[in-house]
Image (cartoon, grey):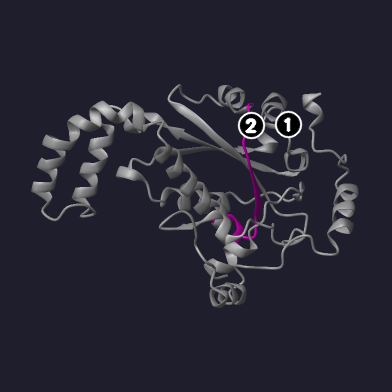
């Protein structure tokens, strides 16, 4: 598939085939995509733990399950616990990574001059600002970019996923030996979809003009009908949910997978 179609076909999948395992090589492709994401200073603060349901303990699975997310938590064969690692910003780690960018000819023009500027002018500021940068919005945005790339690769590989956050994440972190420098971001349920790839249609979103502005807030970025048609033809824009057969599909899935008709996980009760 072309990139625009992958984006258009992406759905939050909540019903997985519990009997069909996810191939390790497909997870590796996702992680490689995450590893190639853009990151300020190339510090690469994104980290993840791959959790295979069949290898996880009952205690670990109970901790992972969020308050909302019953279906995916009971059917996904794999989970990826994404987190941000603060240590890459602290001390010499950050400026040293920027030096590597100069050596790779990614910043600056003259290597020696760039190296001298980093060491003499930028390093002191990096040393002071490192701890703040580790918990700044930009650091978490960089993790989000990595997760996005991994997610798109998952869909291109025929998998589905559901990203979830929960107050339980700190509890989960303790069960998987996350360091004190880690900030949990989200858990991603992963597997082969039991529901159709359309999942009842493309999730409705607010209008473009409601979300984005041109030069200043209050001046909407106007949507061009020609671009809308171009993106529709490229399958980035698709038929919005709910498709007419969605109710029947949901009833079938709940019965076939022996799931209860509730959003709340009984582990919370």
Q: Is 28 drawn above or below residue 134 in the view shown?
A: below
Q: What residue lies at 76% left-to-right and 49% top-to-bottom?
A: 15
In the image, 46: left or right of 113?
A: right
Comes first in the chain, label 1 or label 2 = 1
Nearer-the-camera pick, 166 or 59: 166
What crowding class fits label 1: few (fewer than 14 Cα within 10 Å), some (14-19), or many (20 or more)? some
What crowding class fits label 2: few (fewer than 14 Cα within 10 Å), some (14-19), or many (20 or more)? some
In magenta segment, residue 191:
no
**Given contact means CB atoms under 8 Å apart, are the residues at marks 1 and 2 in contact?**
yes
In the image, 37: left or right of 153?
A: left
Image coordinates of residue 260 in percent, x first then y, are 88, 39
Residue 166's label in the rendered image is 2
Q: Is 90 drawn above or below residue 255 in the view shown?
A: above
The image quadrant that residue 105 belongs to is bottom left
Image coordinates of residue 215 in percent, x first then y, are 40, 58
Residue 67's label in the rendered image is 1
Q: What residue lies at 73% left-to-right and 36% top-to-bottom?
A: 68
Work out how far the residue at label 1 is from the one at label 2, CA to CA, in angstroms.
8 Å
Q: Quadrant of the N terminus?
A: bottom right
Judging from the image, what secondary structure is the residue with disc 2 in? loop
Judging from the image, what secondary structure is the residue with disc 1 in? loop
Nearer-the-camera pick, 264 or 77: 264
Nearer-the-camera pick, 210 or 167: 210
The image quadrant that residue 244 belongs to is bottom right
Q: What residue lies at 10% left-to-right and 53% top-to-bottom?
A: 110
In the image, 97: left or right of 233?
A: left
Which portion, as a residue range, is magenta?
A: 153-167
In the image, 93: left or right of 150?
A: left
Image coordinates of residue 157 in percent, x first then y, are 60, 60
Q: Is 145 drawn above or below residue 127 in the view shown?
A: below
């Amino acid at each position: 598939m072309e990139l625009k179609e992958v984006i258009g076909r992406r759905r939050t999948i909540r019903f997985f085939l519990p009997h069909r395992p996810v191939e390790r090589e497909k997870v590796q492709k996702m992680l490689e995509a995450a590893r190639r994401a853009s990151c300020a200073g190339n510090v690469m603060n994104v980290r993840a733990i791959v959790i295979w349901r069949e290898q996880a303990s009952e205690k670990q699975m109970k901790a992972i399950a969020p308050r909302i997310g019953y279906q995916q938590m009971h059917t996904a064969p794999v989970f990826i616990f994404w987190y941000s690692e603060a240590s890459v910003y602290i001390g010499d780690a950050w400026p040293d990574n920027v030096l590597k960018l100069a050596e790779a000819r990614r910043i600056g023009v003259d290597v020696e001059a760039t190296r001298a500027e980093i060491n003499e002018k930028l390093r002191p500021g990096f040393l002071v600002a490192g701890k703040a940068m580790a918990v700044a919005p930009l650091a978490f945005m960089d993790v989000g970019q990595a997760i996005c790339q991994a997610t798109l690769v998952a869909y291109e590989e025929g998998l589905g996923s559901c990203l979830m956050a929960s107050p339980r994440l700190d509890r989960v972190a303790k069960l998987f030996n996350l360091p004190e420098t880690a900030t949990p971001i989200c858990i991603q349920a992963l597997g082969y979809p039991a529901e159709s790839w359309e999942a009842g249609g493309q999730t409705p979103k607010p209008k473009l003009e409601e979300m984005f502005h041109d030069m200043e807030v209050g001046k909407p970025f106007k949507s061009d009908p020609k671009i809308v048609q171009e993106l529709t033809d490229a399958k980035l824009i698709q038929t919005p949910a709910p498709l007419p057969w969605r109710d029947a599909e949901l009833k079938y899935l709940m019965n076939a997978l022996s799931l209860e008709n509730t959003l709340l996980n009984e582990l919370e009760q």
